[in-house]
Amino acid sequence: MENIHFEKKQLMQQWQGTLISVQRRDEALQDWLLNCVDIFFPCNVKAVQDAILEQQQQDLTIENEIDGYRKDIIKEQLKNEQLTAILKKVLKGEKDSVDKAIHKATNEVKELENEMLVKL
């Protein structure tokens, strides 16, 4: 039983040592990659980050502007619908008035025709 316990402890130490080695290699690889980037793409990382941030801010500004336009469009559509409803009511009222005037004029013409027939 002691052998198993000792072997387990030894494997855990090896595992931890391996993890530490992997972390160190990963850090070394990241440093190497950053150096490669600096060599092959000699630009300031800070400048790139600033450019990305500026672009994100521009994107946000544009999105806010688009949202504003959408809201304005919705307001104008509602206003247009209200004006269209009012116009329909006005036109219906005018149509009714014209229909009544036509009916009245038609009746007057008929009455005049009847009077003319009676006089003849």
Image: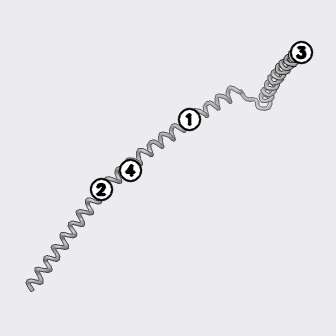
Label drawn at residue 89: 2
The residue wearing badge 1 is 60
Q: In which quarter of the image is the N terminus?
A: top right
Left or right, residue 68 beside residue 37: left
Q: Check disc 2 and give the amino acid type.
A: Lys
The residue wearing badge 3 is 1
Circle 4/circle 2 CB separation < 8 Å: no
- Residue 92, picture quadrant: bottom left
Q: How many marks?
A: 4
Label drawn at residue 23: none
Label drawn at residue 80: 4
Left or right, residue 61 beside residue 43: left
Which tag, 3 or 2, sits closer to the chain's start? 3
* Front of the two marks 4 and 2: 2
Q: How far apart are marks 4 and 3 (CA)?
A: 87 Å
Give the x, y percent position of residue 28: 82, 23
Left or right, residue 47 beside residue 72: right
Give the x, y percent position of residue 6: 89, 14
Q: Check disc 1 and give the amino acid type.
A: Leu
Q: Distance between the residues labelled 4 and 2?
A: 14 Å
- Residue 115, picture quadrant: bottom left
Which tag, 4 or 2, sits closer to the chain's start? 4
Secondary structure under tag 1 reads helix
